[in-house]
Amino acid sequence: MNASIDKVALVTGAARGIGLAAARRFLDEGWRVGLLDIDGPALRAVVAELGEDHRTLAIECDVSGRAGVAAAMEELVAKFGRIDALVNNAGVAVFKPLLETADDEWERVLAVNLTGPFLCTTAAAPIMAREGGGAIVNITSISGLRASTLRSAYGTSKAGLAHLTKQLAVELGEMGIRVNAVAPGPVDTAMAKAVHSPAIRADYHDAIPLNRYGREEELAEAIYFLCSDKSSYITGQVLAVDGGFEAAGIGLP
Ligand code: NAD
């Protein structure tokens, strides 16, 4: 029997892109999965396609609000009874010069990308601890490791999330909860299509040692590894999955 069969993962931002690929990866391994997203119609369509059965649950929720996140966690536990892995993947990107970034854009990026993982983690950790522990993976970005133009809000939110990852690893370790981050390089999702101009695309291609964008499935593999028992002694790490971009040590386009 598959040892993962009773395990439960909650993936935020799971209606498409990297989050959906991660949800599929957990399902492939026999986990039960809560797919959470702010986009209800897209989420329900995806869950219908995955097979709306005892192993999936669609949860419509905005990760930036405490009440909604608490209700989402209750829904998850009511259906599955536990949570073993939390993937804080939901995110939004605004690529703009700092001086053109409006207050509400700044606040939204911080609210979704940084406060969201804080709220989901504080809701999930006590439930994980009750069952002896678990794993949390935060999806940061190479934009949180390297400063560059256009990314003051987005990069700051992701750098904050990388540091929060280390804080949480230290604070939650005694509860048996491991906390790591995956920092993707560019992946050709709806988000990248919206914010990567042709010039950015060409520059990335040249700057990345593997000379290509990452695939959603390649990110999902790293996320799954960091949630699985295969990484049982790894915590507090930020794993760049970026075709060598970070190692090359050059600035973002
Ligand atoms: P995407 O835009 O394709 O998908 C993001 C999902 O999050 C969407 O389904 C969206 O509806 C959902 N979402 C947005 N705001 C939400 C909220 N407030 N509450 C709940 N759900 C919300 O993006 P993606 O490219 O798959 O990105 C996933 C993560 O990876 C993000 O955190 C992103 O910052 C990060 N990332 C992406 C890239 C890339 O090149 N695609 C690179 C580095 C990091």
Image (cartoon, rainbow, N blue to C red):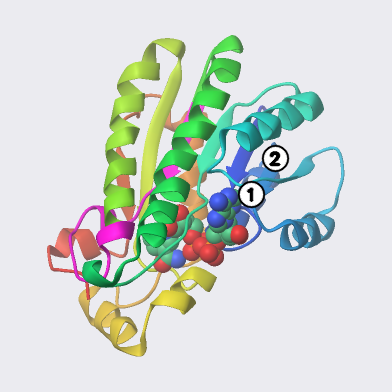
Which residue is at 42% across, 25% downward?
Answer: 178
Asked whether, in this view, residue 7 is left or right of residue 218, the answer is right
Which amino acid, by three-letter code, is at mark 2? Answer: Val
Relative placement, left or right, of 226 versus 209 is right
> In this rendering, does residue 57 appear at all?
yes
Which residue range is magenta in the image? 135-154
* Residue 120 higher or lower than 250, as above or below: above
**What is the spatial separation of the Cα atoms under label 2 and label 1, in whole angstroms?**
7 Å
**246 in relation to 160, above or below:** below
Q: Residues within 10 Å of mark 2 (few under 14, many from 20)?
A: many
Q: Quadrant of residue 82?
A: top right
Q: Which mark is residue 33?
A: 2
On residue 23, which mark appears?
Answer: 1
The image shows residue 28 at horizontal and vertical percentages of 68, 47
Q: Say if residue 13 shows up in the picture.
A: no
The secondary element bearing badge 2 is classed as strand
Image coords of residue 155 (percent x, y) = 28, 57
